[in-house]
Image (cartoon, grey):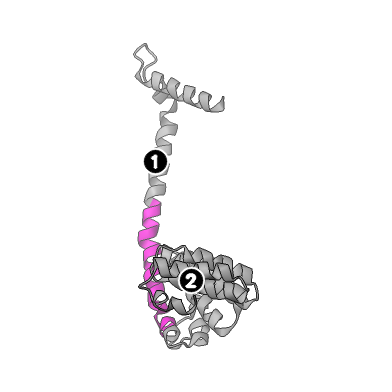
Amino acid sequence: MAKRKKQDDFDDVIVDVVDGSGKSGSFLEQNGKMLFSGIALIALLIGGYYAYNLLVKAPKQKEAVEQMFQAQFQFDRDSFKLALTNPGGGYPGFVDIVDQYSGTPAGNLANYYAAVSYLKLGDFDASQSYLKAFSPPDELLAATKNGLMGDIAGEKGDLDGALSYYKKAANANNDIIAPYYLKKMGLLLTKQGKADDAVAAFKQIKEKYPNSAEGKNVDKYL
C-alpha cells in the first residue's frame, strides 16, 4: 500500500504542473524554493565529489606511488622486513603507507604487499590482518587473495579452511591461477587422505589446462 501511495503522490505532482485549470504552476509556486535548493545541493555534492577526486585524491595517489617505490624495491629483492618498516632513503615502508595513504589504490595495494611480506616472515596473524583489509581491484588479485588466505590457514593448521580458500582461488577464469591452485588442492587432499577428491582435482588440470605448467606435469600426481 505504501508503494502505491508514493506513486499516487507522484501522479498528483504531474497533474499540478501540467493542468491548465487554474492550478497550473501551483506545485512550483509552493515548493520551488525547496526544489531548487535541493537541486543546488545535489550539484554542489557532485561538484565536490569531482573536485575531491581531482584536487585531493589524485595527488594523494600520485604521492603514495612515489613514496612506495623504495618499499617495492626491497620487496622485489626479498628484503621483506625492510620493505615493511624501513626500506631506506627516508621512504616509508608498507606499514606506514597503509596508514598514511588509506583510501588510495596505492594504500590498498600496500595492504597486499604487507600481507605477503608478513607471510614470508612467518607472522601469519599480521599477514591475515593486512590481507583482510586488502580490496582486490580485479578477479586475478581476488583469486590470489583467496590463495594466500589458504596458505595462511594451512600454516596455522586449518587444513579444511585452506582447502576452502584454494577452491575459491581455483574458480578464477585464468589459465595460470586456476591450475596452480587446483594443484594445491590436489596435494592438500592427498595429504588429508582424500584420494578420490585429489584425483578429481588433478584430472581437472589435465582436462581444462593441459598447456599450463601444472598440466604438463600432472600425470606424475595421477
- Specify the segment rendered in magenta: 48-73
Residue annotated with mark 1: 40
Q: Residue furthest right?
A: 157
Q: Amino acid at mark 2?
A: Phe
* Separation of residues labelled 1 and 2 (CA atoms): 61 Å
Q: Provide the major secondary structure of the magenta segment.
A: helix
Residue drawn at (38%, 71%) of the image: 210
Local packing at callout 1 (Cα closer than 10 Å; few below 14, some 14-19, many 20+) is few
Identify the secondary structure beneath mark 1.
helix
* Residue 146, magenta (yes or no): no
* Residue 53, magenta (yes or no): yes
The part of the image, by quadrant, that contains residue 192 is bottom right
Q: Is residue 138 above or below residue 29?
A: below
Q: Residue furthest top?
A: 21
Residue nearest the viewer, comparing 183 with 48? 183
Question: In this orientation, does residue 144 appear?
Answer: no
Q: Is residue 170 above or below residue 22?
A: below
Residue annotated with mark 2: 202
The part of the image, by quadrant, that contains residue 26 is top left
Residue drawn at (39%, 48%) of the image: 46
Left or right: 67 in relation to 166: left
Residue nearest the viewer, comparing 204 with 166? 204
User: Where residue 121 sits: x, y (%)?
Assistant: 56, 84
Q: Are marks 1 and 2 in contact (CB under 8 Å)?
A: no
Mark nearer the viewer, 1 or 2? 2
